Image: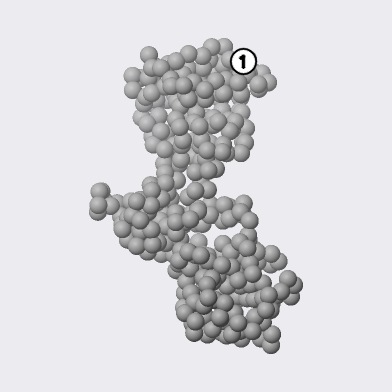
Amino acid sequence: MSKTTVPEQALIGQLLESLQALPDVRVASTRAAPGVQGANPVDARIDLRVAGKSVVLLVEVKKSVYPRDARQWLWQLRSLQPGQNADVQPLLVAESLSSGAKELLRSERVGYFDSGGSLFLPAAGAFIYIDRPAPKVLDKSVRSLFSSRRAQVLHALLDDHDKWFGVNDVAGRAQVAPSTASDVLSQLERFDWLESRGQGPNKTRHLREPAALLDAWAKQVATQPAPAQRRYFVPALKSEALIERLAQSCDAHQVDYAVSYEAAAQRYAPFLSGISQVRVRLQPGPGAELAMAELGARVVNEGANLAVVDSTSAGALLFRRHVGDVWLASPVQVYLDLLQAEGRAKEMAQHLRQERIGF
């Protein structure tokens, strides 16, 4: 008879508390359980009375579950338990379950429970569904995927999503260490967003679900504060002329930059009849100050027609495009920037995604 670890016992205890708090649900007994058909590991058997009906839960406990993990567990479950009795229900219990894993389990009508208190139990004659925010451990893991150098790997994948690539290929494009690229790719595989072929050093991958990855990134951006902007007024120049003069000044003083937000989106996929402000990602330093001075830009609190987002790392300007004589931030970066902007920026973001990004 298998014994559960302390974390597993704590999760099972939390599950029991949640079940006992439900109306018309009574826990008759719970005990550690041997494997089903001698193979599939089961950490506990829980006998319930739900609205007067007997239901047996065969519980397997895992630390964290993503779509790939859930799919593998379902395959194993089907191979070991064909024709499962309706009164006997498998239940996957985990410290954290990703939203994709939950969706997959629900679509297969297989129960789950996580440490955040989410519970799905499609028992015969009873249907229990409680959806609560993801536990902090999952939120932290997901947030880290979309931050700093790890985000550069995501950017590289989205920028060239049609191609197959090795770890060193994507590390080079993202300007990160191969170990960082490998960690990110492994995480994306767990989300089931990548397709792979080959083994070992010859293994290559393909971003099968670029839309899902960009959706997840957009969701994270929505929870973050907008980046700080320095606001300027440049006299006697309308937006298009300002963009051209800005590009000339930055080039003259060897300043790396990328026009973003509405001004870049308008060049990629025209949407508005006109824009009143140019926003640019710019590497700060003496050259940038000289470029601003050459433009005649003066700092203002209101009425700005130029806004600068300081970009202190090379990663912030990755995959920019040289369009005409102007550097534009990549379409993906422009899309994410617009999601944090005001006015009609979010409408413009959706238009850019549909017309230029394409997924």
Name the residue located 25 percent from the left edge and 48 percent from the top edge.
200
**Side of 82 where 356 appears, left or right:** right
> Residue 131, image x and y in percent?
62, 36
Give the residue furthest to the bottom. 236
User: Quadrant of the rendered structure where residue 259 is?
Assistant: bottom right
Q: Is residue 317 visible?
A: yes
Q: Which residue is mark 1?
A: 26
Q: How many marks?
A: 1
Q: Residues within 10 Å of mark 1 (few under 14, many from 20)?
A: some
**Side of 98 where 79 appears, left or right:** left
Q: Is residue 164 visible?
A: no
Name the residue located 57 percent from the left edge and 77 percent from the top edge.
289
Task: Name the residue type under label 1.
Answer: Arg
- The residue closer to the viewer here, 133 or 7, is 7
Query: How are the colours assigned in the image?
Result: one colour
> Residue 151, image x and y in percent?
47, 56
- The residue closer to the viewer here, 344 or 46, is 344
> Residue 291, image x and y in percent?
56, 81
- The residue closer to the viewer here, 258 or 23, is 258
Per the image, label 1 sits on a secondary structure element best described as strand
Where 58 sits versus 192, above or below?
above
Give the residue furthest to the front. 286
